[in-house]
Image (cartoon, rainbow, N blue to C red):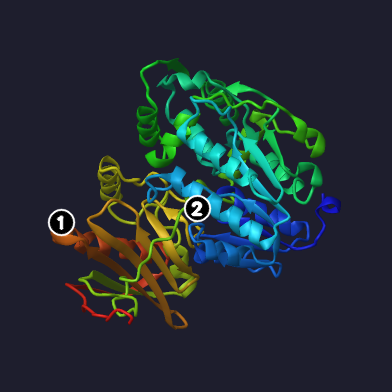
Amino acid sequence: MSEQLGNTGTVLVIGATGYVGSRLVPMLLAEGLKVRAAGRSLEKLMTRAWANNPNVELRQLDLKDLESIRNAVEGCDVVYYLMHSMNPQNKNFAAADRVAAENMVRAGEEKGLLQLIYLGGLGENDTNLSHHLRSRAEVAEILKGAKFPVTVLRAAMIIGSGSASFEILRYLTDRLPFMVTPRWVSTPSQPIAIRNVLNYLVGALRRPETYDQTFDIGGPEVLTYRQLMETYAREAGLPVPMIVPVPVFTPRLSSYWINFVTPVPAYIARPLAEGLKNPAVCTESKITKIIPQDLLTCAAAIKIAIDRIQHHKVESHWTDAGRMPPVEWFHSSDPEWAGGAVFSDVRKVIIEGTAADAWNAITRIGGTTGWYYANWLWRLRGVVDFLWGGIGLRRGRRHPDELRTGDAVDFWRVKSAECEKRLLLIAEMKLPGQAALEFQIKQTGDKRTEILQIARFLPSGLLGLAYWFAVSPLHEFIFTGMLSGVAKASRCKTIVKTAKSILPEQILKVKPAQ
């Protein structure tokens, strides 16, 4: 493909920390291109394997801010637009996507873009189109109205390890040998492997035949969701599930059902479930002649995805998406902190080992490893969180013993992961306040390492205060047990163990800037 790509300018990838963007950047780099990788969180971008490549520039981007887009586009001739606003913070993701697309067009016209490539959703634009697909179609129309060339690729379900759609398919089939399902299991679709999607994205770059064109991209087969589940079962070596479609499932009920059975939360499951009611079949195949490639069958794509999951080679995951929560309150001495009561539980252990020994144990926490002590209580807290409308513990983690900034760890999010020094987790469970869990590592001798475990909570109102004092009695054995479990998992002898609760921490008042 290199002959078509050229190397005339920097390529901007918007959504570089997302599922598709994370995989697209290294493919562009392999073609010898200069890439500006942009996303909501600079911290996340810095943890990607390609972040230190000399041909990569990292840029934090807020698509709601026109000036932010102008700065990101400056010096770039092509933009990959791989974003959506489907997250729990956006109650109206369609409106947010509309504003972002309009800002993108304005900034692109001002900066003289030569091409924008957009990955949208496959589905006929009629009155019955789901809210999610209708929004994707609206974004495509806004972008196509730009004065610079735009290439739109429309895809149905993307099959690949870590995609939200594939995770729903996987967990439903793994966990339910018998299913009473919505009628959308009989809706035809034309899934496509993530490998083929990426090849189309790279192949369309700076190719004049794709300018101001819309292409349907899909695999070689048209299947129903029921047939996909049966295909997955065969490739995974599972019994083919018994499936009984019924007409009573609404998209809302379907999303709750998916949320209950799979780790995918309702705010993602609902728009995806709504979209499954719409046939998603390619209406034309022009792209196959312009960018020829071997299209993987659904069985082949599923087999590759299963293999990558089993061997812990998932490059990107649906849980990667989303903003990083701010934690100015975590250290109450931070200059940004404007006051408040922060409660802490601080515990320390000293092991007869190295910082690497401690880090190896800490970075395996959560997921299949568990929390080193009273896992049944952690599971119970996950159930309570799920019933309260939260995500519970079922997200697990991307990799069993590697952590990077932005990773999900059950109902926590990695805010910072400094190898052999510090791990900071921010709670994403439902709470009357904000919570964080930190591990600090300090090697104090050749065979002597201190592990500091700090749990902190910023309550919200009286309910938050009541919550902290209600759970505080459990901390004595849960947090002590967890830290002891970390020390044991390091396979090193424990030398010293201490604990201290601070109720509350110093309240620091900072005057607002004049």
Which residue reaches farthest bottom? Answer: 445
Q: Residues within 10 Å of mark 2 (few under 14, many from 20)?
A: some
User: x and y percent of residue 463 in the render?
Assistant: 15, 56
Residue at 47% across, 30% down: 130
**Is residue 240 or residue 326 the one in the foreground?**
326
Q: Is residue 174 left or right of residue 310?
A: left
Q: Which residue is pictured at 57% across the width and 25% down the height?
A: 228
Let me know if residue 174 appears in the view.
Answer: no
Three-letter residue code for mark 2: Asp
- Whether residue 104 is visible here, answered yes or no, is yes
Q: Residue at x 25, y 65 (%)?
A: 457
79 lies above or below 278? below
Please give the name of the residue rendered at 48% of the width and 28% of the height, measured from the top-left corner.
173
User: Which label belongs to residue 306?
Assistant: none
Residue 319 position within the rendered picture, expressed as x and y whole percent measured from the top left:
47, 49
Inter-mark Cα distance, 2 to 1? 31 Å
Which amino acid type is shown beneath numbered disc 1?
Leu
Vertically, is 277 above or below 158? above
Q: Nearer the viewer, residue 189 or 95?
A: 95
- Mark 2 and mark 1 in contact? Answer it, CB < 8 Å: no
Check disc 2 and report the residue beneath it: 320
Residue beneath label 1, please? 463
Image position of 304 (left or right of 136): right
- SS of the residue under disc 2: helix
Sequence-first tag of 2 and 1? 2
Residue 419 in the figure: left or right of residue 74:
left
